[in-house]
Structure formats: C-alpha cells, structure tokens
Image (spheres, coloured by chain):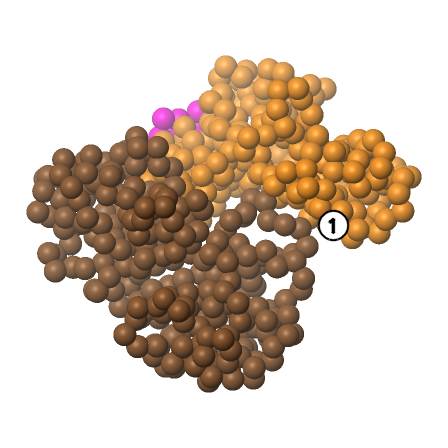
Chain colours: A brown, B orange
Amino acid sequence: MTRFKLVVEYDGTGLVGWQRQDNGPSVQAFLEAAAGRLAGHPVEAVAAGRTDAGVHALGQVAHMDLAKELSADAVRDGLNFWLHDGGCFAVAVRSAETAPADFHARFSAVGRRYLYRILNRRAPPVLERDRVWWVPHPLDGEVMAGAAGLLVGRHDFSTFRAADCQAASPVKTLDEFAVTPAGDELRVSAYARSFLHHQVRNMVGSLKLVGEGRWSAADLAQALEARDRTKGGPTAPAGGLCLMEVAY
Amino acid sequence: MTRFKLVVEYDGTGLVGWQRQDNGPSVQAFLEAAAGRLAGHPVEAVAAGRTDAGVHALGQVAHMDLAKELSADAVRDGLNFWLHDGGCFAVAVRSAETAPADFHARFSAVGRRYLYRILNRRAPPVLERDRVWWVPHPLDGEVMAGAAGLLVGRHDFSTFRAADCQAASPVKTLDEFAVTPAGDELRVSAYARSFLHHQVRNMVGSLKLVGEGRWSAADLAQALEARDRTKGGPTAPAGGLCLMEVAY
C-alpha cells in the first residue's frame, strides 16, 4: 500500500459536505468511488477538515492508501478521469504526492486557512452566486476589520461553537482573522491550527452585526467573553466559505 | 420617457447570448420582461455589444426608456426584483443612472474591454467551471505575452473575423492585448473601440497555438498578415470570455 496526499478542490453547492452521508452526494463518496475504480479495491479517503454542506474548497487535503503501483501524477490524473466518468464535475484533485505511512490528513495538520466572502452591493450575485454571502445594505469594512482583531489570540470560543461540535475543548488559538476589501466584496481570512464546528461562520455572522452598526466592537468582545452561543450572532451562510489551504 | 443607462452582469452559461432569439433564453429577453413588469409598458433594451451564447459580462452596458417616474436606484432595484421574480438568477443590474435622450449604449461607446481566462493546469476546473478555458498541457505565458503584442495596433483583422461578422470594415485598432499570469490562470485582456465578431476568441485561439509551441510569434504575425480566416487558429470557447467594461 502506498499513501497519497491529495489537494482537493470542490464546489460544495448541492453536496452534503465532505463526509459520506445517506442524504446526498458527498466529496468523500465521489473521491472514494473514483479511487476504487482506479485502484481496483475499496479505498477510504480521510480529510483534514470535514466541511459542511455548501462549503467550498480550493485546498482541502485528503489522504488515501492505494495498492496499485501508480506515480503521483497518474493518481491525480486517474482520479480526475474517474470523477468525470462517474458524472462528478464538482470535485477535482489539484495535486497528488506520495506520503509517509504515518502521514494523516487530519491529525498531521498544523494549520487551516479559510476565506469567507461577503458581497456587499445592491445587485444580487450572478457570476459569484453560491460563492458569496450577499449583503445588500452597506457594511463598514474598516470597523469590521478593527473588531475582527479582538477575536485573534487564545480564547474560549464557546460563543462561536455549534451545539453539535465534538472538539474536546472550546479553547482555540486564532492566529489570523482579517477583513480586506476587494472590489465590492469584503473578504474575511481566518487562520488557526484548528477550528470549532461552525466557528468561522459564527464569527463572520457576528462581525456582520458590527459592520451594520447593530453591534459595537465592544459588543463583539463581550459576546466572546460570555462563552455562550446564545450571545453570538447568527451563523453566516455556508456558500461564502472556502477552505483555502491546510498546513503540515 | 426617461432614458436609463444600466451596467449589467450576467452568467452566459445556458443563455443564447445578449440578443433575443427563438431558441432559448437571452439577456435581452430577461431584461425586457423585467422592465415591462416594472414600467407597465413594453420596453426595448439596447446593449453596447451583442455577446454570444455562453459569454459572460461583469460590465455590459444597456439603455432603455421608461415612462414611469422612477429614481435610478429604484430602476436598478426594481429590475433586479422582477428578474428574480421571473425566475432569472443569471442576470443582475449592477447600477442604473439617468442618461440624455441621445445616449446610445452601442453607438455612444468609445471602448470595450474583454477578459479571456485560460485555466492552465492538469486538474479540470471546478469552482471556475464555465468561466475559463481549461488547457491541461503547459502553455508558455511569457511567449504568449510577447506574441500578443504583435496584434496591437491598427490592422485588417480578417484572419480573426467570424464569417457572419456584419462590421463594415475588417480594419480595427486594437489598443491592448496583454497576457498576465494569475495563479494557475493566464488572463488575456483586450481593449479596443470595437471588435469584429469572434475577434477576441479567434485571437486567443491562435495565441494558444503560440503558447503550445505549435506556432512561433512570427507565425502569428504571418496569420494576421494573411487577412484570411482559414489561416487563423481555432475559436476559443465562449465560457472563458467576459465583457468587463464599456467606456463612453
């Protein structure tokens, strides 16, 4: 068996997320089906992060073990061939490389970067539909950028944690949480060793309240301090979120 | 009647192009239907450029005359409301402003900018599917950039002119034709007062031959000189092309 590390891109629209589920198509199921066709045996794919339904990835990382002798480039091209052959146009393998047997896409990861895109204009999104959160009323990006900095650091992020989160502890270190304007978008970049379930989307949902002037930056700091999900803002929609890269 | 100038964004995938046709949905038909609902009378929409099926726009410009008294912002928001109400998610009005009665979206325009995106990587496009031309084998972007410059200037562009082109003359002045790398994309920006039918896609199709090493830059110059469509390269696919802006 050879272990391969894959960088995977997907369009989460219409998928139930990374993880195989009974109620719809998943990235994992598509990849495992393609790998089974390529290798001729059942294959399990393990990802760095189990993204939710509707969340996209440009740089998800997964690993899988293949018994067939194949070069890394042949694995990349073969998986892409069988993905298309299986009618899947929502997932592609950007790169493949051989990895040591103890490499684990999830447990070896030391950092994850997410990008959350807010489209802040009157007109609804067209070319970026399902890729952005459309907020038609004006947001104050500078105030949001300042407030975002208050969440950076080591904190108990219970306020931004989904009820079903299975992490052992709500304490995480957020290394970066930055808001940058880009045309009529506000782009929120988040980097940490790991995140709680829904953490980025919940932080963005609260940050939007700051951008609207409904919350002050101090309100955001107080919400964090409360360590109580009911004190946080709403969860931002899945479509605006993209897993950009995983560091090892 | 008040004339309005609109900046229009659309996703050309699945549309027959700007112009109303019997064989499928067009941007013009969607916009005119929405305007009819808004104004309560039949409305004609006239565009700066009649883009082909599958071609996108971030900055198409159109004009229309409305009898109803409406602010420009109400026209923008009203058109977007009726577009959505009519089941159209492929077209949005980015901005509207009142224009003089002699403003004409097509005849008043003094410049058009198009962007053509080539995705040059082994993995097929996923998040940018239908927005880029996927070329899986390596292209030499620097050589393409150098060759592109040979087409800039005032020339007889018959080699890059579609058979059905209705322009009075094949002589056009190409002000800019530049290739810029952006991640795993090559972006080709073209600016001119006006273009022949298929001119950008035909120039890009030939430029790709240069990037593959199948043509030299001199071959491209010779093709231009030949003033003969049969001496040009193939037409690049519609999905990679986007009308970015129209200048007045």
Q: Is residue B151 shown to the viewer in this render? A: no
Check disc 1 and report its element: helix, strand or loop.
Answer: helix
Q: Give the residue pinned by disc 1.
A: B77
Q: Position of residue B172 (x, y in %)?
A: 66, 28
Find the residue positioned furthest to the front.
A22
Quarter of the image with the C terminus of chain A in it: bottom left
Q: Is residue B232 magenta?
A: no
Q: Residue at x 38, y 75 (%)?
A: A174
- Label 1 lies in what chain? B
> Range of the magenta residues?
B213-220
Q: Nearer the viewer, residue A56 or B147?
A: A56
Q: Nearer the viewer, residue B184 or B43?
A: B43
From the viewer's perspective, tell me whether residue B177 is left or right of residue A29: right
Q: Quadrant of residue B128?
A: top left
Q: In the displayed structure, would residue B60 be above or below residue A122?
A: above
Q: Is residue B56 shown to the viewer in this render? A: yes
Q: Quadrant of residue B59?
A: top right
Q: Position of residue B239 (x, y in %)?
A: 51, 33
Q: Residue at x 57, y 68 (%)?
A: A208
Q: Position of residue B209 (x, y in %)?
A: 41, 28
Q: Quadrant of residue A73?
A: top left
Q: Is residue B219 magenta?
A: yes
Q: Nearer the viewer, residue A129 or B151?
A: A129
From the viewer's perspective, tell me whether residue B183 is left or right of residue A74: right
From the viewer's perspective, tell me whether residue B124 is left or right of residue B89: left
